[in-house]
Image (cartoon, rainbow, N blue to C red):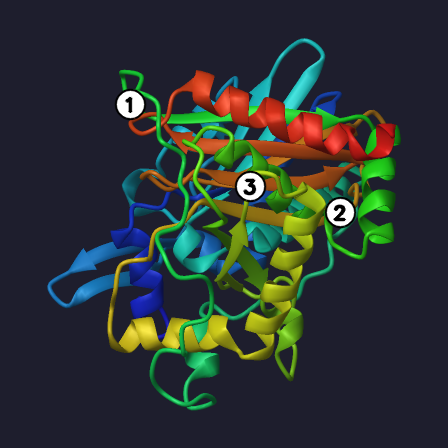
Amino acid sequence: MTTTERPLTVSETAFILAGFGPVVVRTAFTGQFDPVLLESAWQRLGREYPLLRCGILGSPDGFLVALRDSMPKVAVGADTFEHEISQRLEDGAISRLSLYETTDTTVLALAVDHSVSDARLVQALLRSLLRIYTALLRDEVPPSAPRPVFEAGLEELFSGRYEPGWPEPHGVPGEPAVLPGGSGEPPSGIGVHHLEFEPEHTAEVVAFARASRISVTGLLCGALSKAVLARLPEEDGPRPVTFCIPVDMRARLDPQIAPDAQLCGALPTLVTVPVAADDEPLDVGQRVAAELLAGLGRDEPQRVLLARCLTPAPPPPMTFMVSNIGVVEDPVLPEGLRVTGSQFAATLHGPVPAMFVTTVSGRLTVDIVYDRAFHNSGEIGEVMASVEATLRAPVSR
């Protein structure tokens, strides 16, 4: 390995082989950006975070990530989030910044390859970009503290810290419940169903979850369980429901990983709970929360990552992926620009839909991303309608 290239690790390579698209954070603003200053800010960001200037290359021995001399130019963005996340990164690039403008709205979309990033990192990078842009607009020199070209990933950080081998299975016997799937809608591609709650109701949902001693993620898992089981034939007794919940490991390590470290710091954690048709979503959410904490206490995400690197295996069947990055604070912006909304997602082709959740400007934003080859918009629309009804029901009593 040289200072300008390195091989992708086994866990990083798995993202590529699984067909993941990039992580995309798409933020809408009122007002307009100066395109020349935006390009300058983007190029400066590539000097502060050299990984953004890299490309991924195939080689006889696997995949390499190599530093390039320059960043891609700011690209023309897509008019919808669905189209934005469907765009692949071109020419092996690791990153792309897109700009889409209308008469009254500007949209920035930052995409970074998922093998070396996650939503929290991309959010941090976008905030850094806006900080640099604001400084340039004010004719100031932005402070500079470039990160290393390459940084250690979780696989390297965990190596030797855990007993080798797969963790003992914990959960409920049987195959997990999955959406039956609607007939695919040609042409196949990625679909998005968007749901957003006003600030007043978002505050009520958060207060209800806290009073019930669960997270909003747990409440959403309960709502999804109800929606999925409603679409399946009735059975006697409970059945397993499996959620894949990405957990940010940055603050869980000692020492902690920097929030803007150039790596994928989110580890998927599988949580399986028994769910009966008449279970209340709140009860299911509490089970999910308890199992998630127990799995984290057993260091299961770390151990599974290392085990899968030594003995690659396909992921087990899952009901849903639920990724919630919590509250995203509005960035400091120059006069004339204001954030009006933000979404994030990473695409994975296959039968498991993914729910991406964030709270921006006080609004709870929920997107279900799905592969149209396995699910159609009507099916996903019914699931989202059920989730919305569940989230509105507790606080309307």
Snapshot quadrant of residue 25: top right
Helix, strand or loop under label 3? helix
Left or right side of 351 for 95: right
x%, y% of residue 258? 64, 70
Dot 1 or dot 2, earlier in sequence: 1
In the rendered image, which residue does mark 3 sit on?
225
- In the image, what residue occupies the spot 87% across and 38% down? 203
Dot 2 or dot 3, earlier in sequence: 3
- Within 10 Å of disc 3 (Cα), the crowding (few <14, some 14-19, many 20+) is many
Is 38 drawn above or below residue 319 in the view shown?
Answer: above
Q: Give the amino acid type for the residue marked by disc 2 in the picture.
A: Val
Left or right side of 195 for 238: left
Dot 1 or dot 3, earlier in sequence: 1
In the rendered image, which residue does mark 1 sit on?
188
- Classify the position of the N terminus by image quarter: bottom left
Snapshot quadrant of residue 257: bottom right
- Classify the position of the C terminus by image quarter: top right
- In the image, what residue occupies the spot 11% across and 63% down? 60
x%, y% of residue 199? 85, 30
Q: Disc 1 vs disc 3: Cβ atoms closer than 8 Å?
A: no
Helix, strand or loop under label 1? loop
Helix, strand or loop under label 2? strand
Q: Nearer the viewer, residue 85 or 336?
A: 85
Q: Nearer the viewer, residue 83 or 356?
A: 356
Residue lying furthest front: 236
Q: CA distance from mark 1 to mark 3?
A: 26 Å
Is 244 drawn above or below residue 254 in the view shown?
Answer: above
Q: CA distance from mark 1 to mark 2?
A: 33 Å
Specify whether residue 155 is in view: yes
